[in-house]
Amino acid sequence: MDKNDDIEERQEEDFCFPSVDHADLSTTTNKRSICDRCDRPTPRVCICSSLPSQPIVLRRSFLHVVVHPKEAKTKVRSWPAVGLVLSNSSYAVSKCRRFPRGGLPNIPGEGGLAFLLYPGPNAISLDEALQKLEQDFATSTGTDQQPPPPVQLIVLDATWRYAKDMHTNNVKDKVYPPNLIQVKLTSA
């Protein structure tokens, strides 16, 4: 592969591709015994005992997992587990380094709250995010009896280095939803 091919490949990976299929990225050939359901080595790394028997349908929220192209190529990836926990209508996976100028594909609904699970100086705690959700739900279920718009959850799936790069580019390009709230997960 020459330098031009590498640049061309990187440009193709630069922007989101809608809904990456788990099977498209699965190229592992291990000599170890692999679980048919979670695609992890058995019995030590298999996570099936912790998974729900049926996928969960999110009624008021939508999860968007944005996977860095390099993360998508690693052998032990975390994002395929989302498909084992949530129904297909509850989430979307995109493989990209940065969002397209029009914003994220596959996120239904307008308005409502959008949460980015990523630490930062303006990030709020998970408890504060839950309080915001309760307040938003209380104000949106007024007299018109319209259901509140779905809550958008955005997760950057990458190493810290690549996630920081993805986040910085998306802030610079101003492609996050205008109502985005950053949430940091802290250890107890």
Image (spheres, rainbow, N blue to C red):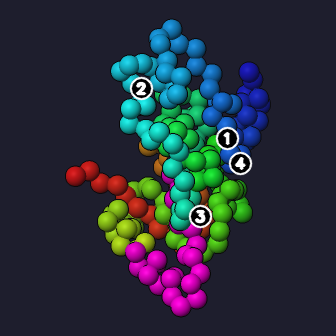
The answer for how far apart the CA atoms under marks 3 and 2 are is 35 Å
Q: Is residue 134 visible?
A: yes
**Numbered marks: total:** 4
Mark 3 nearby-residue class (10 Å; few <14, some 14–19, many ≥20): many
* Residue marked by disc 3: 176
Q: Is residue 159 visible?
A: no
Q: Secondary structure at mark 3?
A: loop
Mark 1 nearby-residue class (10 Å; few <14, some 14–19, many ≥20): some
The residue located at (41%, 26%) in the rendering is: 46
Residue 68 sits inside the magenta stretch: no
Label 4 is placed on what type of residue? Pro
Tell whether 113 sits left or right of 21. Answer: left
Instruction: Name the outermost residue toward the front.
Output: 53
The location of residue 162, given as percent across then percent down, is 51, 43
* Residue marked by disc 1: 20
The answer for how far apart the CA atoms under marks 1 and 4 are is 6 Å
Bounds of the magenta span?
Answer: 134-157
Which label lies toward us, 3 or 2? 2
The location of residue 85, given as percent across then percent down, is 49, 43
The location of residue 141, given as percent across then percent down, is 50, 83
Nearer the observer, 129 or 88: 88
* Residue marked by disc 2: 46
